[in-house]
Image (tube, rainbow, N blue to C red):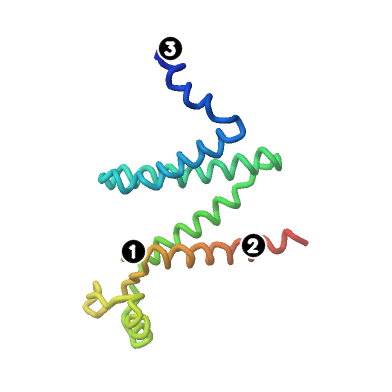
Amino acid sequence: MSNAVTAALARPFTLVPPRWRQPIGITILVVCALLFPIVHDNDADIDSMANAAAYATLALGLNIVVGFAGLLDLGYAAFFAIGAYTYGILSSYQLQPPWSEFWEPFRVLHLVSKVPGDTGGDAVHFTLSFWLALPLSAAFAAFWGVLFGAPTLR
């Protein structure tokens, strides 16, 4: 781009007072991020953007720990992984315990469903929604974080 084009694109931003430029820019960025899945119908692109946001969050955490504390600590990444692994278990077919009467109240609440198992009997499929599995996974990761972090606070 030439300098004239760059100047023409930057001109509207010079009309905004300097103290409002960052909040307005962040607001525009958040609105665009929230509208992206609505206006874009390619699920692969949406998944890629979600992965990029997750990795950016991890990178920011590492930057804060190394930059402010001066320590190379990857412990927070382990708890990030515990939460992600827990969410994966709660929302996939990877874990299918055998069906028993224990699961019947959960089936009534639509938290699990009965599916045909690999060995001939019925099995349990966890049908938790994203919005229920997310806080459960975060709470599980927080539990392990507190459990491992408590001895270091002495």
Identify the mark at residue 4; answer none if there is no mark: 3
> Which residue is identified by label 1?
92
Examine the rendered structure and indicate whether residue 110 appears above or below residue 46. below
Examine the rendered structure and indicate whether residue 51 appears above or below residue 85. above
Q: Quadrant of residue 20?
A: top right
Looking at the picture, how far across and down is residue 137, in whole percent? 48, 64
Looking at the picture, how far across and down is residue 39, in whole percent? 29, 44
Examine the rendered structure and indicate whether residue 138 appears above or below residue 14. below
> Which residue is identified by label 2?
148
Disc 1 is placed on an element classified as loop
Q: How far is the residue under mark 2 from the one under mark 1?
A: 27 Å
| Front residue (pair 4, 87) | 4
Q: What amino acid is at disc 3?
A: Ala
Mark 3 is surrounded, within 10 Å at the Cα level, by few (under 14), some (14 to 19) or many (20 or more) other residues, namely few
Question: Residue at point 39% right, 14% down?
Answer: 1
Q: Earlier in the sequence, mark 2 or mark 3?
A: 3
Q: How far is the residue under mark 3 from the one under mark 1?
A: 54 Å
Disc 2 is placed on an element classified as helix
Question: In this rendering, would 96 be left or right of 147?
Answer: left
Question: In this rendering, would 23 be left or right of 102?
Answer: right
Question: In this rendering, would 146 be left or right of 26?
Answer: right
Q: How far is the residue under mark 2 from the one under mark 3?
A: 57 Å
Q: Earlier in the sequence, mark 3 or mark 1?
A: 3
Q: Nearer the viewer, mark 2 or mark 1?
A: 1
